[in-house]
Amino acid sequence: MVQRLTNSRLANLAANDIYTACAAFQSQFKVITGRARARFAQRDWHGMQTDAAERLDIYRRVVEQTVAEIRNALADRLTDALVWASIKAVYSGLIAECDDWEIAETFFNSITRRIFTTVGVDPQIEFVDTDFETPPTQSRQPVYRTYDRALDTAALITTILSDYQLGATYENLPRDAQLVAEKIDAKIDALGAAGGPIRAELAAAVFYRGKGAYLVGRIRNGAQSIPLALALLNAPQGIFVDAVLLREREVSILFSFTRSYFHIEVERPYDMVRFLRSIMPRKRFAELYTAIGYHKHGKTELYRDLLEHLAASDDRFEIARGQRGMVMAVFTLPAYDLVFKVIKDRFDSPKDTTRQAVMEQYQLVFKHDRAGRLVDAQEFEYLEFDRRRFSAALLDELRRVATQAVVVEAQHVIIKHAYVERRVTPLDLYVRESDADAARAAVVDYGYALKDLAATDIFPGDILLKNFGVTRQGRVVFYDYDELCLLRTCVFRALPQPTSMDEEFAGEPWFFVGEHDIFPEELRRFLGLYDALCDTFTRYHDDLFDVRFWHAIQARLRAGEVLDIFPYSQSERLAQLQIADCNEHLLLQ
Ligand SMILES: Nc1ncnc2c1ncn2[C@@H]1O[C@H](COP(=O)(O)OP(=O)(O)OP(=O)(O)O)[C@@H](O)[C@H]1O
Ligand SMILES: [Mg+2]
């Protein structure tokens, strides 16, 4: 007969199993992340895309396997609260040796939330707060490298560029060092003499994403600190510096919540996000963890941040501003820049999608290149809030349209499933409420958003203004995913010419319209832009109404080309590399 283990022995084994599984996750994550350097050096953009998708899959796979093992190991004691309190205590001891203890805490939470499907949170079985208010281990090496300016700025930049091993040679290092130095010197001059030595502090890790590699840090000029990001590209003739970003706003856009996650090799994410936060103080830790690929831990941090906000304020959940969704019910906290999106029980006509299909669309966006234009959404389950924190109008609405996703109890509101994402200003409201210049700029960027999405094989489906929003950096982004599709699957058609009066004045299309057909000439009608704003849009983006634009991009995508989109504007690109006749982001040849 097999001897039954004591509770403490069992807890010990289970804690070790979870610990080993977390280490396996980290090592698989690091193997893929570590490939980025070679992908960049070899210009293997398809390889980079595959890696990005594969890396996003590891977490779920490892968690599922671990849950199955733990179910087996704990058997009839699977939900024994005492056993789990011991497992958590042993685990806490094990991870106190790790440089990525906070990632390990989140991993543990993922396991217990699967097993218990906990409503709300339970500090006995998950790390609601971290066990480590201060880091349990010491950093052995600094997260950034320091370079002192001895001679001039060009020499400083030469030293920096030569120091990072990118696996390929520079096309013309002295030229780039000179151009970068000119920009930095101009910036230093503009800020006025601060005195003191000038030095650069740059993250030791290189940030890889898509076709780019980025060196990220700051310039110290005495007491002044200037953000610095060098954007590197690798052309057939060699690596070159494509842009120098010297403002917090620009570096923030590089790290936007609408971009896919960076691949960076880092031993202590804790130190790295703190370094990044010193450069971008307005970004939450949650966003920075997510930006470097630890999106699950980003979610933990986001949840902790939300709890803190609720504890420190009287903020109440309200219906989000803007047009109500036919598919999603959306609410927000006025003083906190997130929205909560729950899937409605029934979808108003003409929507004929399903809950499952909507979730698959969000999953598609999670895996896809978000191009700086698709808002990242975190999926939460079984959130529990005090009912008094909800406005009466919102409670009414949720009880009316979202009974599958939301349960309203006497004391609590339980959100069984929600997507949580950054709040932006819906574009329809923005163009109505802003001054003429801001509205025009937004409308122009809206066109570029459509083009960036097209370049990354996305057609948003529902292109009405209400489905786009404006970020605090003034960028136009898209958030309504239920009709989004891959551009390659769309059939772009020119409107057939009518051959008779009957056809010409027919109220309905007199020709066959397939399920995936899109008539670019008709897009103008959908924009809902009038007068001066419509003229502005047309001046910059007339090509969007021409079927040839869409066919040309489809052809390039089908030929396997990975099209360029840049996380910075043309004006930030170094002069000699600008291509005269390209529009802001997309080169359509
Ligand atoms: N990230 C966001 N920031 C601010 N408001 C948002 C955000 N996401 C959604 N909203 C608001 O909620 C509304 C509904 O959201 P969304 O468009 O995603 O839902 P939907 O049901 O798919 O819409 P539709 O009926 O257009 O298909 C939007 O019109 C907008 O007003
Ligand atoms: Mg919508």
Image (tube, grey):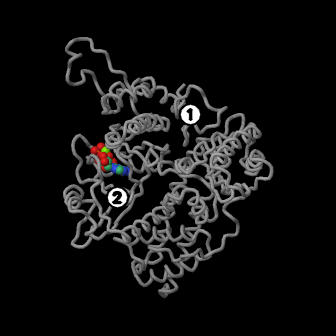
Residue 43 in view in this figure: yes
Amino acid type, callout 1:
Glu
Position in image of residue 248 (x %, y %): 55, 51
Q: Is residue 363 left or right of residue 503?
A: right
Q: Is residue 437 left or right of residue 255?
A: left
Number of other residues with Cα within 10 Å of mark 1, as a class: few under 14, some 14 to 19, many 20 or more: some
For the residue labelled by badge 2, is the local secondary structure a helix, a strand or a loop? strand
Q: Residue at x 76, y 56 (%)?
A: 148
Q: Is residue 236 left or right of residue 557?
A: right
Position in image of residue 564 (x %, y %): 56, 36
Question: Which is nearer the eye, 553 or 12?
Answer: 553
Q: Identify residue for label 2.
A: 418
Residue 357 in view in this figure: no
Position in image of residue 234 (x %, y %): 67, 39
Q: Identify residue for label 1.
A: 561
* Nearest to viewer (mark 1 / mark 2): 2
Q: Quadrant of the C terminus?
A: top right
- CA distance for labels 1 and 2: 36 Å
Amino acid type, callout 2:
Ala
